[in-house]
Image: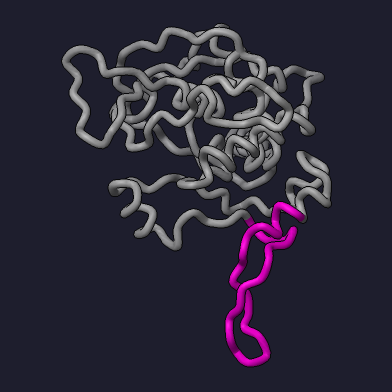
Amino acid sequence: MRLAQKIRTGIQGYGKLSFLSRLARQTHDAKTLPAVPYQIVKQDRDRLGSTGNNSLRWLALFGTGVSGLLGFSTIAYSDEAEHGLGVPNYPWPHEGILSSYDHASRIRRGHQVYQQVCASCHSMSLISYRDLVGVAYTEEETKAMAAEIEVVDGPNDEGEMFTRPGKLSDRFPQPYANEQAARFANGGAYPPDLSLITKARHNGQNYVFALLTGYHDPPAGVSIREGLHYNPYFPGGAIAMPKMLNDGAVEYEDGTPATEAQ
């Protein structure tokens, strides 16, 4: 059992950059939306692992082009029943034997989705700007991006803190000063950090994709408390986060159509 767990952990813990890439590929190659069953999801169990390259896997997920994945496989993992509504196994184009991530466009698009849609509420505290160099942006582009933020640093020779422009070694800025501020701004809900989100959720990237595209009106007989939104893939079926991926929500630099799934 211990050996099997070590092997599983090793397989799961291989990459920060893979998340951005998956997100990018999903949004680029999809074609049709699947029908989503109207069921309430049971408890979703977290599976945490090493940081590895999984932080950027989230950005890849956004930039891949989720639209093309929606019309394909709907076969769920056999052990998914204990977690509630079964999540489809989408045919990710980067999971073939010889497949790889399209860093230049898809991870870059995933980062644009994060910046324009997610960063106002969700942090990616394990990502530094230097992680994007040579992956989604040039060094010059990344330096310019980092310089747009202000970082509290110090103390200086006089013992005082000061602010300075960001640099490559700085991590992505936090949307809130602390957890209490985050909960207050979100009706008591705490937006999770997205650095390792595909590792921290059962069936990782498939779950995240299904959740983001699974918003629907509640079925007959199901009432949702004010301030919450129905999503059958979320534990309990009621989630504080509203539907965020909408047509025109993102403006891609490469001219990719900004549809909900894209």
Q: Nearer the viewer, residue 206 or 183?
A: 183
Q: Which of 248 and 25 is in front in this view?
A: 248
Spot occupied by residue 4 in the image (x, y as percentages of width and height): 60, 33
Q: In this view, does 10 lie to the left or right of 189?
A: right
Spot occupied by residue 89 in the image (x, y as percentages of width and height): 55, 15
Magenta stretch encompasses residue 155: yes
The image quadrant where one finds the C terminus is top right
The image quadrant where one finds the N terminus is top right
Q: In this view, does 132 lie to the left or right of 180?
A: right
Q: How is the image coloured?
A: one colour
Q: Is residue 240 left or right of residue 68?
A: left
At 56% from the left and 20% from the top, the residue drawn is: 259
Residue 164 drawn above or below residue 6: below
* Res. 181 visible in picture: yes
* Res. 3 visible in picture: no
Q: Nearer the viewer, residue 233 or 159?
A: 159
At 49% from the left and 54% from the top, the residue drawn is: 175
Segment tinted magenta in the rendering = 144-171
Q: Main secondary structure of the magenta part?
A: loop
Q: Quadrant of residue 149?
A: bottom right
Q: In which quarter of the image is residue 217?
A: top left
Q: Specify the farthest residue to the bottom.
A: 158
Residue 127 drawn above or below residue 22: below
Q: In this view, does 39 lie to the left or right of 88?
A: left
Magenta stretch encompasses residue 152: yes
At 52% from the left and 30% from the top, the residue drawn is: 249
Residue 64 drawn above or below residue 133: above
At 62% from the left and 31% from the top, the residue drawn is: 251
Q: Quadrant of residue 8?
A: top right
Spot occupied by residue 71 in the image (x, y as percentages of width and height): 55, 7
